[in-house]
Image (tube, rainbow, N blue to C red):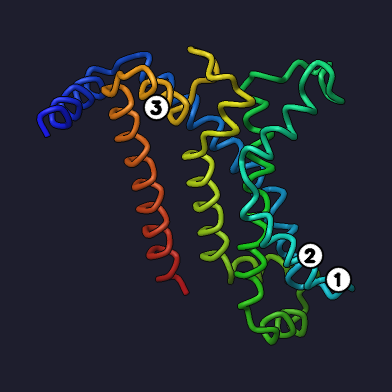
Amino acid sequence: MDFLTKSLAEAAGMLFSLDPELYFIVYVSLSVSLMSTLVASVMGIPLGFFIAVGQFWGKRGVITVLNTLLALPTVVIGLFVYALLSRQGLLGHWGLLYTPAAIVIGQVILILPWVASFTVSAVSRIDERYRRTAMTLGAGPFQTAFAIIREARFGILGAVIAAFGRVIAEIGIAMMLGGNIKGFTRTMTTAMALEHNKGEFVLAVALGIVLLTVSLGMNILLQVLQGRYGEDR
């Protein structure tokens, strides 16, 4: 118990002393996670919307595949992207391996099914009469789509928050594609694993506190947005 108390106290000291190494790790982790979430959202929300409202052969199969990909292991993604970005790989000439960009690519593949699948679920809950009413009132295809997405915004926002939480706590892809390079690609999760293996628990505990704080902040933001926009309805 004394060891845990001491670790927490020293970790708090690192946080409040604005330790540059600690905060650069936090910066790298947040930057790659936010970029991954942004790219996955730009791709996944329209994809999920068109799957939800579209009528095409194999629709149930596509949804089943999306739901299955939610459980795709990060190690599998890491190996697949590593094979593409390595020197012998198809995209090896880009020189992206062991860079933040490589982490972003892997994380986008990881959370794209999350955003798309949860968007399908959110849009599917909107009554079909809502779409027909919008079109009856003269709304075009894009206006109708925007109206439906606005109605399903809470579910879609929840999908984005869940995707962000998934990547910021991810370690396999960050380790395999980023290489855990100090001052370049080291993230909170990879640094925590490294410090644990070295027996240095103070930095690991500090990063754990930051990770939990960020997750708490994102959930609070979701609740605030839901309350604020819920009053406008």
On the rendered structure, is 197 left or right of 54? left
113 left or right, relative to 160: right
In this rendering, the answer to whether 117 lies above or below 29 is below
Residue 64: image location, x then y, percent: 73, 66
Q: Which mark is residue 46?
A: none
**Gap between marks 2 and 3 measured at Cα:** 37 Å
Check the picture and name the quadrant holding the N terminus. Answer: top left
Q: Amino acid at mark 1?
A: Gly
Q: Amino acid at mark 2?
A: Val
**Cα–Cα gap, marks 3 and 1:** 43 Å
Query: Dot 2 lies on which element?
Result: helix
Residue 192 numbered tag: 3
Q: How many marks?
A: 3
Residue at (87, 25) in percent of width and height: 90
Q: Are marks 2 and 1 in contact (CB under 8 Å)?
A: yes
What residue is pinned by disc 2?
62
